Image (cartoon, rainbow, N blue to C red):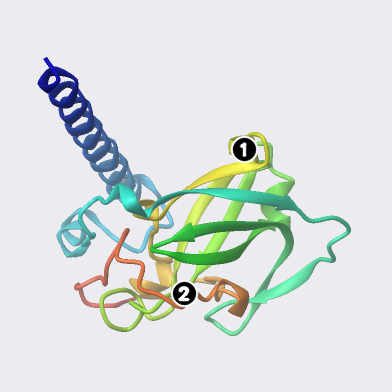
Amino acid sequence: MKLLPILLLLFSLNSFAQSYLEKIEKHRESYKQDFVKETNSPLKEEDLKSLHFYDADSTFVVSAEVEILKNEKIFKMPTYDGTSKEFYRYAKVSFNLNGKNLQMTLYKNIALAGNPLYKNLLFLPFTDETNNKETYGGGRYIDLSSKEIKNNKIEIDFNKAYNPYCAYSDGYRCPVPPEENDLQLEIKAGEKLYTGEKKHKQ
């Protein structure tokens, strides 16, 4: 009689794993198609075969404690083309990943904050120990929304980490992840190195 609950548990865990894989697969398909639809995109349909990702891994989904920051000053986040963009530090997030207690900062882009479409957008740029080996040397980004903060918590899914446009082409103003978001471990989740030829924006 005791076998049935175990079998049901295994079945539900397997169902969760399958549905999570499908969710990430859909997310990545949509991500690829955005390159084709976006007029300012560095990639065309034929370049999509050179995009690569780690296998979806739900252990890289974390529930982070959120501390909203007050009275933060606007600062200029350097970009890889030598210019900068204006941001302010919106919140600190704390979480445990692979046995390590980590802290990162979420930012708000000043230019986008005034646009109703992007007013809730939170920017999470980061670097980790896979950079320059398995992932883009300039770090990766995750997009979040302030609406996703519930009871001072937010879910961060590193499987949704993506490369800045600068990974594919020059001529873009991609923010450099601040030092405070340098993670001292390998984040083997999300987008890997682009294997196509780097382009030159006209």
Does the rendering let one see residue 127?
Answer: yes
Q: Residues within 10 Å of mark 1 (few under 14, many from 20)?
A: few
Question: Label 2 sits on what residue type?
Answer: Thr
Say which residue appears at 23% left-offset and 59% top-offset. Answer: 53
Does the rendering let one see residue 201?
Answer: no
Judge by depth and name the residue closer to the eye, 30 or 181.
181
Say which residue appears at 33% left-offset and 71% top-offset. Answer: 168
Residue wearing tag 2: 127
Q: CA distance from mark 2 to mark 1?
A: 27 Å
Q: Is residue 63 above or below residue 20?
A: below
Dot 2: element: loop
Residue 185 position within the rendered picture, expressed as x and y whole percent measured from the top left: 40, 75
Judge by depth and name the residue closer to the eye, 111 or 103.
103
Mark 2 and mark 1 lie on one chain; the one further toward the N terminus is: 1
Question: Label 1 sits on what residue type?
Answer: Leu
Say which residue appears at 85% left-offset and 55% top-offset. Answer: 70
Q: Is residue 127 left or right of residue 191?
A: right
